Amino acid sequence: MLQMDVASLKRSIGDTSCYELQAALTPLEVRGETVSFCGPVRVSLDVCNTGEGLLARGQIAGNLQMTCGRCLEFFPYAFSLPFEETYRPVSGGGEASSGSSKNDTESVTFSGDILDITPEVINNIILALPMKALCREDCPGLCPHCGCNLKAGQCGCESEKIDPRFNVLKDFFGREKK
Ligand SMILES: [Zn+2]
Ligand SMILES: [Zn+2]
């Protein structure tokens, strides 16, 4: 869990605290696929008490185990993303003033002295995932004939392709022999 103790920060408006967090997160379910993390997710944040809430800004970094869209092999996918979120403390029943706060999707509410940013971090990672991940930009993928992984080397199917110019020659020599 990516959690920080904001007990003292909560009480001092205008203050900023730095947090370095890291946690091993459970695998993500993305578009029907399970994506696991390789190692912990690291978050470094500056959290500022703006008076209205806690503005957390920083960077998320880590590695995911993704499946290559071409060769179907697992590969480590490194990510580094900006993070920005406003956390508003839940005030005890003082929500009657204006209805606008309910439509406010810009901020997340929290209560107590522990701020858990795990859900927002996970959302950010999922949103940043590529639709089709490739183990490398020029991954040759699988051979359409035998299914072998061309990254490991040529499979032999390629050499069976007959050069059309060679066919002409074969015909030519075939005719000569008659
Ligand atoms: Zn690949
Ligand atoms: Zn092949």
Image (cartoon, rainbow, N blue to C red):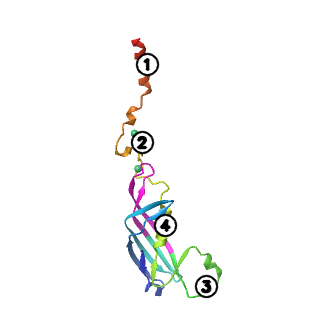
Amino acid type for the residue under numbered disc 3: Glu
Residue under pointer 1: 171
SS category of the residue bearing label 3: loop
Q: Which of 24 and 101 is in front in this view?
A: 24
Residue under pointer 4: 124
Residue 93 lies within the magenta run? no
> In the image, which residues are magenta?
59-85
Q: Which residue is drawn at 39% across and 43% down?
A: 148
Task: Quote the CA–CA distance across marks 1 and 4.
Answer: 63 Å
* In the image, the residue with mark 2 has its CB under 8 Å from the nearest atom of ligand 2: yes
Task: Quote the CA–CA distance across marks 2 and 4.
Answer: 35 Å
Mark in the foreground, 1 or 4: 1
SS category of the residue bearing label 2: loop
Instruction: Determine contact: label 1, label 3, CB under 8 Å.
Output: no
Amino acid type for the residue under numbered disc 4: Asn
Residue 126 lies, in percent from the top left, at 48, 64
Residue 38 lies, in percent from the top left, at 37, 63
Task: Quote the CA–CA distance across marks 1 and 3.
Answer: 89 Å
Residue under pointer 3: 95
Is tag 2's residue or tag 3's residue first in the polypeptide sequence?
3
Residue under pointer 2: 143
